[in-house]
Image (cartoon, rainbow, N blue to C red):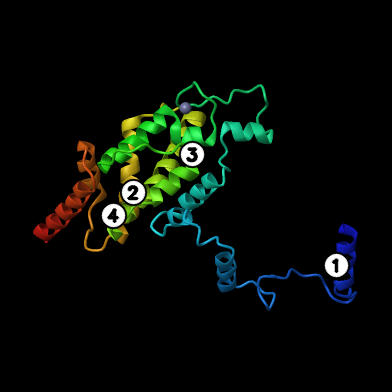
Amino acid sequence: MELVRLINLLVAAPDICDECEDHPVWSASSLGVLKVADLYSFVVDNAGATLRITKLLWLKHVPPKVQVFGWFAWKRRIKTREYLQKLGVISQNESTVCVFCNSESESMNHVLIWCPFVWNIWTEMLKWWDVQTALPCSVESHLLWWAGGKLKKKERLIWGAIPLAVMWSVWRCRNECVFRATPPNLEDLCELIKIRIAFWVNPYLRYFHFSVQDFALHLRKGGFGLRGVLCILGFAVLTLVQSA
Ligand SMILES: [Zn+2]
């Protein structure tokens, strides 16, 4: 069967031209030339852009490097100690223990989702929004859960940025711990995540421009949900109007 297939392929192969140079051909395009529009169509035709999870990964208000990090996390390609050991980068004798809890092996789902230290961050994010729920324990199911629910456009901007902001910030904090021996601080990290989100969404919230300093100052008081966030934004607008 395989032999027949090979013969058919060889028979159908184009003639070899000694005078022509080899060159790459983009097979997804009828002209053989790569164009962005053709690439987009190719991705859409192969269901890439229609996957539900992509709606939470490719967000225009999140920095591209963070989007790419989220994509790597979804594809299970983050360079955790377990992953590096699997690749042979670190030896089998080296410890893969998590730098945050010092008790369990550092897998991707552990370090980004259910390590006790990281779980407290997710809990804080839910508390920020006055949400009480049980969260899934894998990155993919976590992202899918976060993509659910119905929210208004402005709410979705902030809510949708949370998973990427948390995972990105946790990973950076983990690297600081590993490479600079900086001890993690839960409160500071939670505040940093909210400030990052404020920076990211600020340019996209028309009519709700606010200073990040004001945002951070109020966040330090903690314990408010989306209504509180929008109140802060409104407060900032009022402050600007009054000072104008
Ligand atoms: Zn841990």
Image position, residue 158 (x, y; %) = 32, 52
Query: Which is more N-terminal, label 2 or label 1?
Result: 1
Label 4 to label 1, Cα distance in Å? Answer: 55 Å
Q: Nearer the viewer, residue 200 or 37?
A: 37
Determine the residue positioned at 58% across, 67% down. Answer: 45
Q: Indicate the amino acid at tag 1.
A: Leu
Neighbor class of circle 1 (other Cα within 10 Å; few <14, some 14-19, many 20+) is few
Query: Which is more N-terminal, label 2 or label 4?
Result: 4
Neighbor class of circle 4 (other Cα within 10 Å; few <14, some 14-19, many 20+) is some
- The answer to whether one can see residue 191 in this image is no
Q: Which mark is residue 76?
A: none
What residue is pinned by disc 4? 155
Q: Quadrant of the N terminus?
A: bottom right
What residue is pinned by disc 2? 197
Q: Secondary structure at mark 1?
A: helix
The residue mark sitting in front, 4 or 1, is 1
Q: Indicate the amino acid at tag 3.
A: Ser
Determine the residue positioned at 47% across, 44% down. Answer: 141
Q: Nearer the viewer, residue 233 or 75?
A: 75
Label 4 to label 2, Cα distance in Å? Answer: 12 Å
Neighbor class of circle 2 (other Cα within 10 Å; few <14, some 14-19, many 20+) is many
What residue is pinned by disc 1? 9
Image position, residue 177 (x, y; %) = 47, 29
Which residue is outermost to the bottom? 31
What residue is pinned by disc 3? 138
Determine the residue positioned at 55% across, 62% down. Answer: 47
Q: Count of labels shown? A: 4
